[in-house]
Amino acid sequence: MLGSFGIAVTTISLLLSLSLLYLSYYDLKLSSNRISKKIYKFSFLQILLTFLSFITLIMAYVISDFSLINVYENSHTTKPLFYKISGTWGNHEGSLLLWINILVLFSFLFLILDENKNKNFRLYTLIFQNILISTFLIFLLTNSNPFSLLYPVPTEGMGLNPILQDPALAIHPPLLYVGFVGSSIYFSIALAALITKVDSKSLATTIKPWVSVSWSFQTLGILVGSIWAYYELGWGGFWFWDPVENSSLMPWFLMTALLHSVLVLERRIGLYSWVIILSILTFTMSVVGTFLVRSGILNSVHTFANDPSRGLFILSFLALMVFSSIYIFFKYAPNENKNYKIFSKESFILLNNWFMIFFLAVVLIGTLYPVFLDTLTGQKISVGPPYYNFILAPFLLPLLFLMTSGPKHKWISPEKIGIFNIVLFIAVILFIIIFILIKESSILLLLILLFSTYLITQTIFDFFEKLKNKSINLSRIISHFGFGMLIFSISLNQIFSIEESFNAKVGDERSFKNYTIKFNNLETFSKNNFKSAKGYFEITDNKNSTSQNLTPEIRVYNKPETITYEASINTRLFSDSYLTMSNISSTDVFNIKFQKKPFMNFIWFSVLLISLGGILQFTRFRKKI
Amino acid sequence: MKILLLTIVLFFSNSISYCNENKTYEILKNLRCLVCQGQTISDSNSDFALTIKEVVNDKVKEGLSKKEIYNFLSDKYGDWILFNTPLKANSYFLWFMPYVLFILGGIFLYLVIRKSTEKTKQ
């Protein structure tokens, strides 16, 4: 029932997208300088029906309608309601429908929010956006239909992978998709700007809010995914440079570059073509990311759903998209006047772009090189954290330095600013205090600490300056401060992390450094959809004689049958205690892993600040219009 | 060039400090669990991971260096097991391309800025 309804609704929304394509094209030739009412009406219907198809799928999950293959394969009646709903986008077909919903949402928001722009510019944007929407709808209906029916109707579903049954992972895909798919709108805007020869000021003001909003959501999405990996995967890390994680980071670098370049474009100093290239690349990279995750060519801890035929479709779509963008770009690219002065703000923004593109290149090479090498020569190599840390970490030093001094320079003014000042002096003093406290011997880590302290001190100074002078951009201060804090906290986390792994039976005790861990008790119990063995541990800190209780679990889920290891984490302001246990087969001995993870809260909080800067930028901007 | 030199200096200082850390533990963090999806040996509880943990522990006790242990494991299981990609003919591109790109990007940027400043002088 719901299946046929869903197919009908989705088909109608495809027809609406095609009609919108036709109507927008037809409207281009009309002399009126306003977009015809019909387009508004059709757009409204389009968003209504697209939402409806998504709601239909959610309903099918809520009532466990197993006549839909998709529901049968990914849900189960005993699953809590919350995870029935989030299960909707926990699989390929459902998440593709969410992807399309966001495409349509952005298309609609663009139509109603950017009313004061040139008519043909808006129409072309709608055309490109609807080409994307139609293509993905056709892909959905022909290859990945979430409403495909199953007969005879099974009485029970197969269940959702238990490690996906988690609040963080329920909101992670929607956040990340707003980031990923949000970049589609400036992809369309960029192409439309080329064709209609929009001037740099209005191109900049049109894409700026969209870039800020997608960038903020992308940042939040990455943060939530990282938090999930930290407590759910049970290894106590928050970033593994895993190919799937990299896929979310690559568009982020481009968005960051774009966010800065737009500022130059806005002041008519140059970068017109470059902003267009970045806009096209960002969405391309988002589709590449989707391709990498969905096609299953990558070996990753996050690979949950994949199928080669999808990969083939996305790859063909990608090729088509890239080639037509390149064609449009070279056909319409304008000659522009560039006017960059050394030591002016715009030069520093160019330097920012240089670093962002470099970071992107490193991550792209690291992710794809093993795949190409395997395909071409059959040799399998792994590229892991040591590679990225080794290549990227040294470049953080100049980046942090540029982030500190760049914003102090003026636009179009080649004025040099002295590096030696009170801020640097304070930063160095703070750094010396830190140095005495931590006794770390790695020069690289120490320098990173020094430079991040410098950035943090500078942004705090800027903040007080801002209180006096209203014209300073607060969102920049917050985001840069967040980034400084992030690097600072990660470095300290690296230095102070403790890890101890040992085997123990119930009743055993283990002492190391300042800690004593006692395995007090083991309890087994059954819940609705899993069985669990829960360990009771007491950890005593001998230094200040405090103790805490941690209770890691081993869970055996029944639908589908999976073992998960649930970490027990005690979060304090400055440090997390992290305990996991795992059974050693056919013995009563457990492998216990205890970790001290300092500054985790600071890491999460600083990413939140980075993202907050983007959101502020968006609201500030909307107010100005 | 300065940056490259700096990198090399930093690399050495880095590797010196890491030597002092727990050797077995660091090795296990850099090994891929071959039967898992993208997990390290250190993080995995699979039988394969447990075996490798034993092997590495024994080799460290025998007094083998980190390099010898990595070589021993990659001879047996291939380079796929090593997360810290060794510098070999098949990974020159991987290790050097980023620096080449960074330098090329820098030259390009320099030319763009110089061209633009010359134009405004005229």
Image (cartoon, coloured by chain):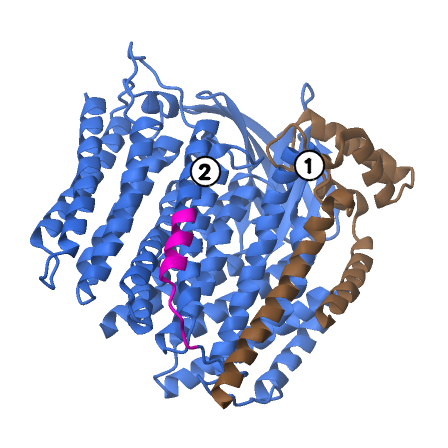
Chain colours: A blue, B brown
- Rendering quarter of residue A339: bottom left
Q: Position of residue B85 (x, y in %)?
A: 73, 45
Q: Position of residue A603 (x, y in %)?
A: 53, 59
Which residue is found at the position 59% from the left and 75% from the top? Answer: B110
Q: Looking at this view, is A525 or A396 the one in front?
A: A396
- Chain assignment, label 1: B
Vertical placement of residue A141 versus A28, above or below = above
* Residue in the picture at 44% in, 80% down: A463
Label 1: few (<14), some (14–19) or many (≥20) C-alpha neighbours in 10 Å = many
Going by the numbered disc 2, the residue's amino acid type is Leu
Q: Is residue A591 visible?
A: yes
When the figure is inspected, residue A155 is found, relative to residue A528, above or below; the finding is: above
Q: Which residues are magenta?
A: A323-337
SS of the residue under disc 2: helix
Q: Amino acid at mark 1?
A: Arg
Where in the figure is residue A370, as x and y percent of width and height? 64, 40
